[in-house]
């Protein structure tokens, strides 16, 4: 078609179409070749362990075309059942056994088409698909709830740190300073090989997930900032821990600074400055000097406490919603194992 919605490997995550990119045929990449029909299943052939597959349903009245990075599966029976079947641990194991390549393991369409697949009757396929669809709807609703909570907090951060919202009885101007003047900023001590299965201490890297290690190099309250990888990702921790070499560890130099307040200040300020921190390379990173020079404004200690307490309520709500999402996702994995063992 002359104009279409293009789906490539970066637009799908865990069964959800994240972006709706509409392009013309003249500007289309050469990989835009899979013209989609309702109920088609897209299977990610490169790094299939990520399971960023899609059960396709049309959006509005515009055609959709997928990248050749996907295998296009069109079921003779229930497309939605097929979508769930390719997510079973058994099927994924068969896929990974036939993948080639180290950094970007991939399976080709010929090998994929030869994989065994057990099918119940069409009526049972439909019942299984309908049941699992309900779980997916619950998961998607929960994801939307989390996103809404995050948007609410982002709006509140803007009001607070632009100082358009102040607590009653607080009118004193905030004091301008820099991050380096109120915090020590150090880098972590360890490389990725320090991770162990059952370590005694948390190990913070430049990823969202926290790992474990056998030793600690830091103790007390700290803010962790990812220097590369998930650039700008921040975490707060209080205890003994260790950190990766490209993770920055910030600890307060003064009793006049509440670190939980400061973390929220960084969450608000850092995204606005992140572009100036990046060197334009394929692997962007943040330098220690740019963090040290980052301007911040500090209200009184009591106002910092009130702001930190208010924002902690939002963080607790988000954490509770994320924990519920993990429960739903665990439930789905369990059901897939039981139904497709």
Image (cartoon, rainbow, N blue to C red):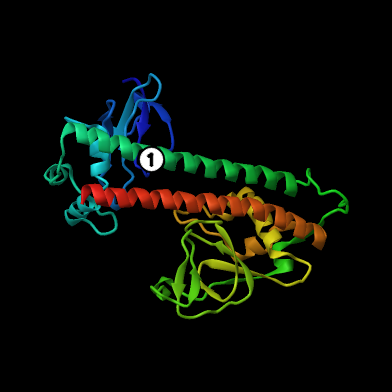
Can you say whether 247 is above or below 100 in the image? below
Q: Which of 43 and 182 is in front in this view?
A: 43
Question: Residue drawn at (11%, 44%), measured in percent from left and top?
Answer: 114
Q: Residue at x 38, y 73 (%)?
A: 197
Residue 101 % position (x, y): 22, 56
x, y (%) of residue 194?
Answer: 42, 75
Closer to the camera in the image, 194 or 238: 238
Is any atom of residue 102 visible in this view? yes
In percent of width and height, residue 53 lies at 31, 42
Q: Where is residue 137 in the image (x, y as percent from the top left)?
A: 41, 37
Disc 1 target residue: 136
Say left or right for 291 vs 100: right
The quarter in which the N terminus is drawn is top left
Left of 262 or right of it: where is 274? left
Front-most of residues 207 and 58: 58
Q: Residue at x 33, y 34 (%)?
A: 29
Q: Is residue 73 visible?
A: no
| Above or below: residue 111 compared with residue 103 | above
From the viewer's perspective, tell me whether residue 300 is left or right of residue 321.
right
Element type where label 1 sits in the image = helix
Judge whether 143 appears above or below 93 on screen: above
* Neighbourhood count class around disc 1 (C-alpha, 10 Å): few under 14, some 14–19, many 20 upward: some
Identified at 21% across, 55% down, the residue is 93
Quarter location, residue 8:
top left
How many numbered marks does the figure carry?
A: 1
In-image side of 229 versus 182 (left or right): left
Placement of 283 over or under 336, stated as above or below: below
């Amino acid at each position: 078609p002359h104009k279409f919605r293009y789906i490539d490997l970066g637009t799908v995550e865990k069964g959800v179409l994240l972006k709706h990119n509409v392009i013309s045929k003249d500007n289309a990449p050469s990989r835009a070749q899979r013209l989609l029909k309702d109920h088609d299943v897209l299977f990610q052939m490169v790094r299939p362990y990520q399971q960023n597959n899609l059960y396709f349903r049309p959006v509005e009245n515009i055609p959709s075309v997928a990248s050749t990075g996907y295998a296009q599966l069109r079921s003779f029976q229930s497309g939605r059942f097929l979508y769930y079947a390719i997510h079973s641990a058994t099927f994924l194991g068969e896929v990974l056994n036939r993948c080639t390549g180290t950094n970007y393991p991939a399976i080709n369409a010929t090998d994929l088409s030869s994989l065994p697949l057990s099918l119940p009757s069409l009526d049972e396929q439909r019942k299984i698909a309908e049941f699992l669809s309900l779980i997916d709807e619950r998961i998607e609703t929960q994801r939307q709830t989390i996103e809404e909570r995050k948007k609410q907090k982002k709006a509140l951060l803007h009001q607070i740190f632009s100082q358009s919202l102040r607590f009653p009885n607080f009118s004193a101007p905030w004091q301008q300073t820099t991050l380096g003047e109120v915090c020590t900023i150090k880098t972590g001590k360890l490389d990725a090989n320090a991770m162990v299965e059952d370590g005694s201490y948390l190990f913070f890297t430049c990823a969202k997930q926290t790992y474990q290690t056998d030793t600690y190099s830091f103790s007390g309250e700290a803010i962790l900032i990812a220097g590369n990888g998930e650039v700008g990702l921040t975490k707060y921790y209080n205890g003994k821990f260790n950190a990766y070499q490209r993770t920055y560890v910030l600890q307060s130099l003064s009793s006049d600074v509440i670190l939980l307040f400061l973390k929220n200040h960084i969450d608000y300020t850092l995204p606005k400055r992140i572009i100036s921190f990046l060197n334009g390379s394929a692997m962007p990173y943040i330098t220690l000097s740019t963090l040290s020079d980052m301007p911040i404004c500090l209200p009184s200690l009591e106002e910092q406490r009130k702001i930190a307490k208010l924002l902690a309520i939002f963080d607790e709500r988000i954490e509770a919603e994320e924990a519920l999402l993990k429960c739903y996702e665990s439930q789905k994995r369990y059901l897939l194992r039981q139904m497709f063992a």
